[in-house]
Amino acid sequence: MENLKITQTGKDKIWYDETGNGIPLKRVTKVERLHEKSAEEILKKATEVNKKLADFKAFVQDKCTEAYEAFMAEKDVKKQTKGNYTWFNFNRTIKIEVSQSAPIKFDDLTIVAAKEKLDQFLNDNINSKNEFVKDLVMDAFETQRTNQLDVKKVMGLTRHKARINDPLFSEAIDLITSAIRRPESKTYFRIWLKDDNGKYNNIELNLSNI
């Protein structure tokens, strides 16, 4: 609801619930007041930690970029296309890993069109030579528990384009390829410290969602 206060205190004579209904303070129970106060304290701390993590991630990003560019400049590499990379301090007691993830998603309408083409192919063009692809198609388009397609299985169909060598199947594969979207990419940083036994131990930091 618009202008709804996040938290309420004993100074508020009327408390408002999630539907905007006003409840007199005297009808708010002790437990509800405790939950309100504790939730506000947790939210405040969580916001502070989130801000510190965001600042720290920006700091790590700057240092990794600086380290990467300095290395490439030393090697006289003009064109610098960043991907995944790892760098160390002088005696390699500290290891920094930088990795990028660009998950594939499919355009909904295009992938539906591809599935229609594949269904038509399965109905009209299956023979002993290409019968194996039937199970592959059915397995690829079986949705997961999250009601999402398994991207790897769907993309796996593209490997069989030349082998099947059928116009309808090829059209479906072309649609799958054109349905690919990479809406966002994330950069992950992992920081490792070598122990006395020479083993690198990861310093746990969940920065991926910042």
Image (cartoon, rainbow, N blue to C red):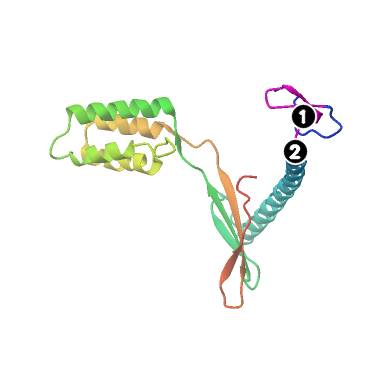
Please state the extent of the stretch shown in magenta in the rendering. 14-29
In the picture of the structure, the residue carrying the numbered disc 2 is: 36
Quadrant in the picture for the N terminus: top right
Q: Residues within 10 Å of mark 2 (few under 14, many from 20)?
A: some
Q: Is residue 146 above or below residue 78?
A: above
**Residue 57: image x %, image y %?**
68, 50
Can residue 30 be seen at all in this image of the molecule?
yes
Q: Amino acid at mark 2?
A: Glu
Q: Is residue 94 left or right of residue 7?
A: left
Q: Is residue 184 left or right of residue 159?
A: right
Depth check, mark 1 against mark 2: the one in front is 1
User: CA separation, marks 1 and 2?
Assistant: 14 Å
Q: Residues within 10 Å of mark 1 (few under 14, many from 20)?
A: few
First-in-chain label (1 vs 2): 1
In the picture of the structure, the residue carrying the numbered disc 1 is: 27
Q: Is residue 89 above or below residue 127?
A: below
User: What is the quadrant of residue 178 in the picture?
Assistant: top left
Q: Is residue 28 above or below residue 207?
A: above
Q: Is residue 18 magenta?
A: yes
Dots 1, 2 in contact, CB < 8 A: no
Q: Is residue 69 left or right of residue 128?
A: right
